[in-house]
Image: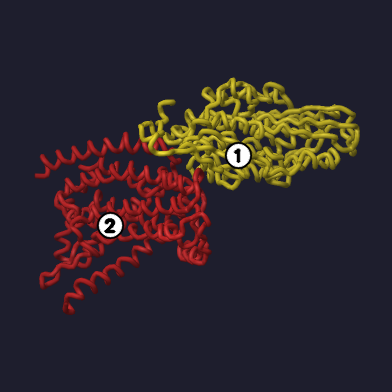
Chain colours: A yellow, B red
């Protein structure tokens, strides 16, 4: 597709007569396509991107520091606010890290319930990504269809956890509730219908000539570059690197389930798009297996009311919707964390911006930002 | 300079302009409403339905809101150009309606004809093309005089887009001219009535080229690059209040104008389908006019719907892709089609 990009620069002797200079364009922090308060300073030659610099920090709330002033339990809900579109997954990461340092065994049933909620959250996050990504490239209808389905998931969360966006899903050691009465059939109905809806999105985009032209060969990052930049999640897998935390370092019984990790080939915007679309289908498979094989048993492991982990450190990662989400926690044996560090996938994936955008056009920058799927709450923390 | 002369050259045209402007303004205002409602239904929502029955008062509410907004002129702008630029877009969009013939002319008993047209210019089509090129000046000036980078990119895009799409548009219209033998709007419709076919069939390629070029000409999805909402916000980034409304209304007026024009060029305009218009006219002149205008409106509405439909379905092209389509696909196609039309004219329409 390299020949697909016409060279727009003036190559005639005119160039020497007419003075031309590069323009610096401030893309953001208030810009409809930067998904929040992300700011990119783009140097442009005409519409061609010569250089790009990311400026972040507009949404810094000191979440990691905040956690140090709360007890281990009280700190849980604040991590929902990292990637506020994947709150359940954030919660799982933190809770998992504390369980690891405590050495608590989470009951099998709780693990399965966590898998169900995690994957629902992954679908919800990908749906919002799909809508906004489509909107960035100019396809506005997809947003409304995607939000319609996301709404069903939000309703499921509300019915089970009492909250829609930031449900503070898991306590340390397990889950709070079993599925409420009537919840599982509603969920199954959603799962049965959802793949057809994904087909609908695909008819609008996957084979759409304009969509393909706008995304194929755009924002390319090779497998080596992706690994060197420490990208993760669909942004990494779009380049064909097979790394998914759920498979590589299984947690919460992911080894019990049969699912595939969708991989791209070219590492362009289109492949990252396809990866996420296919991931949604895989998530449906995982949830169905988890609901079918739901074991009986306790909901919560043996955790005291006051949590005082032994002195030491622990690192626990989950596969969040945006990539590998890691929590590094240090305990000095007190009731409060001594340090919590978050390995935020959006933040690290954002490093790929320069590799992906250079040589493209402004419109490509917008497509690339969409394809990295950043959430500024997580980037700035 | 007697009274009769005044009536014929000042009074009647003014009256006609007034009679035409009111419905045109209404239609343009309701085009916005139509688009929002139809987009709503495409996107599993309702669209504006709160203000008045079915949201029908919405355009008035929107207009009032924009009228009451503060008129901001940025510090970096060139105030004079910044202020007059929207007018450059606004007026050509509406003046174009003047040369469109809306129904069969009435012939009175004394042999005088009264055309349903403000100015029955024999170069009507060319006037519309010239005016639509003028509209671009408003966008260029507005973007450039804003003193801001985003609008500048918008107008740069607009300039190259105009160059790339004006030419195919003109060529596709030229082939209609070849088929009809006249630039006068009423002659073009009359030629289609005489031929018995709408020009859609001999001019199917021209029709396709016209549709694509018209979408680009009116800066709408998938060619809405000068606006490019999610990329460069648009040439009117710095505009607010009524000046923004001028651009906004001009865009929709252009949509209506190109729809109406397409209906006249390719779908026979006010020709009533499946009916012998001349015979009907001899029997019921008034009925023919009413049915003719209705048929015309329906044909135009089909195109207007088409515009909205595209917007609901397709993403936006990229700048270089847009130019490539314009120069490497549409332009040769339009040229080829001109040849076809000429041959058709030579052998079949003699």
Where is residue B202? Give x, y as percent. 20, 42
**Outermost residue to the bottom:** B3
Q: In which quarter of the image is residue B169?
A: top left
Residue denoted by label 1: A190
What is the CA distance from the residue labelled 2 to the residue labelled 1?
Answer: 47 Å
Name the chain under label 2. B
Q: Can residue B40 be seen in this view?
A: no
Residue B5 image label = none
Horizontal and vertical percent for residue B19?
A: 30, 69
Give the letter of the chain under mark 1.
Answer: A
Q: Which residue lies furthest to the left in this view?
A: B350
Report the residue that reaches farthest toward the front. Answer: A17
Residue occupying the point 66% across, 28% down: A289
| SS under mark 2 | helix
Residue at image x 33%, y 41%?
B164
| Residue linked to disc 2 | B296
Q: In this view, does B61 lie above or below A368?
A: below
Task: Report whether B188 appears left or right of A211.
Answer: left
Q: What element carries label 1?
A: helix
Q: Is residue B59 found left or right of A308 in the rendered image? A: left
Q: Does A117 sit left or right of B332 as displayed? A: right
Camera-near label (2 vs 1) is: 2
Between residues B46 and B115, which one lies in front from this camera angle?
B115
Circle count: 2
Q: Quadrant of the N terminus of chain A?
A: top left
């Amino acid at each position: 597709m390299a020949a697909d990009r016409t060279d727009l620069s003036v190559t005639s002797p005119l160039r020497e007569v007419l003075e031309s200079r590069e323009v610096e364009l401030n893309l953001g922090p208030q810009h409809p396509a930067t998904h929040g308060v992300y700011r990119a300073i783009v140097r442009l030659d005409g519409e061609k991107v010569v250089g790009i610099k990311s400026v972040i920090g507009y949404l810094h709330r000191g979440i990691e520091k905040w956690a140090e002033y709360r007890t281990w339990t009280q700190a849980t809900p604040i991590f929902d606010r990292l990637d506020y579109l994947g709150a359940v997954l954030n919660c799982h990461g933190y809770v998992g890290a504390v369980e690891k340092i405590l050495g608590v065994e989470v009951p099998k049933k709780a693990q399965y319930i966590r898998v169900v909620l995690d994957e629902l959250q992954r679908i919800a996050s990908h749906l919002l990504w799909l809508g906004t990504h489509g909107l960035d490239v100019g396809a506005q209808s997809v947003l409304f269809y995607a939000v319609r389905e996301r709404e069903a998931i939000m309703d499921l969360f509300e019915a089970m956890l009492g909250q829609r966006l930031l449900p503070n899903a898991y306590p340390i050691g397990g889950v709070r509730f079993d599925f409420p009465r009537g919840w599982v059939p509603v969920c199954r109905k959603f799962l049965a219908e959802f793949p057809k809806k994904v087909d609908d999105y695909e008819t609008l985009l996957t084979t759409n000539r304009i969509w393909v032209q706008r995304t194929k060969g755009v924002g390319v990052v090779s497998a080596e570059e992706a690994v060197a930049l420490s990208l993760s999640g669909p942004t990494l897998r779009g380049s064909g690197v097979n790394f998914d935390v759920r498979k590589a370092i299984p947690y919460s019984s992911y080894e019990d389930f049969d699912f595939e990790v969708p991989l791209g080939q070219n590492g362009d915007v289109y492949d990252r798009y396809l990866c996420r679309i296919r991931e949604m289908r895989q998530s449906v498979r995982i949830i169905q297996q988890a609901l079918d094989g739901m074991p009986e048993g306790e909901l919560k492991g043996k955790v005291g009311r006051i949590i005082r982990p032994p002195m030491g450190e622990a690192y626990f990662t989950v596969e969040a919707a945006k990539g590998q989400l890691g929590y590094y926690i240090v305990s000095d044996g007190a009731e409060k964390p001594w340090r919590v560090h978050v390995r935020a996938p959006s933040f690290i994936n954002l490093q790929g911006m320069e590799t992906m955008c250079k040589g493209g056009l402004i419109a490509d920058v917008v497509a690339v930002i969409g394809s990295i799927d950043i959430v500024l709450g997580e980037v700035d923390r | 300079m007697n009274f009769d002369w005044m009536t014929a050259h000042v009074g009647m045209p003014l009256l006609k302009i007034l009679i035409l402007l009111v419905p045109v303004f209404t239609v343009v205002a309701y085009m916005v409403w139509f688009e929002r409602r139809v987009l709503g239904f495409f996107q599993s929502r309702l669209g504006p339905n709160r203000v008045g029955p079915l949201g029908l008062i919405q355009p008035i509410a929107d207009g009032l809101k924009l009228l009451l907004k503060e008129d901001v002129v940025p510090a970096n702008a060139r105030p004079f150009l910044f202020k007059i630029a929207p007018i450059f877009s606004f007026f050509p969009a509406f003046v174009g309606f003047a040369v469109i013939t809306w129904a069969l002319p009435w012939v009175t008993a004394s042999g005088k004809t009264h055309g349903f047209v403000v100015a029955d210019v024999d170069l009507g089509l060319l006037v519309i093309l010239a005016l639509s090129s003028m509209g671009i000046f408003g966008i260029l000036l507005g973007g450039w005089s804003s003193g801001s980078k985003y609008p500048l990119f918008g107008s740069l895009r607009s300039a190259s887009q105009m160059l790339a799409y004006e030419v195919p548009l003109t060529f596709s219209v030229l082939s209609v001219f070849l088929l009809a033998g006249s630039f006068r709007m009423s002659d073009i419709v009359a030629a289609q009535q005489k031929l018995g076919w709408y020009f859609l069939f001999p001019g199917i390629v021209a029709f396709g080229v016209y549709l694509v070029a018209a979408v680009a000409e009116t800066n709408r999805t998938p060619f809405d690059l000068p606006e490019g909402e999610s990329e460069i916000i648009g040439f009117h980034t710095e505009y607010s209040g009524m000046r923004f409304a001028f651009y906004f209304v001009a865009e929709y007026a252009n949509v209506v104008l190109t729809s109406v024009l397409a209906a006249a060029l390719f779908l026979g305009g006010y020709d009533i389908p499946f009916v012998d218009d001349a015979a009907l006219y001899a029997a019921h002149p008034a009925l023919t006019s009413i049915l003719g205008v209705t048929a015309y409106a329906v044909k135009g509405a089909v195109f207007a719907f088409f515009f909205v439909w595209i917007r609901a379905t397709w993403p936006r092209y990229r700048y270089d892709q847009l130019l490539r389509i314009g120069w490497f696909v549409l332009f040769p196609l339009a040229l080829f089609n001109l040849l076809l039309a000429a041959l058709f004219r030579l052998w079949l329409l003699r």
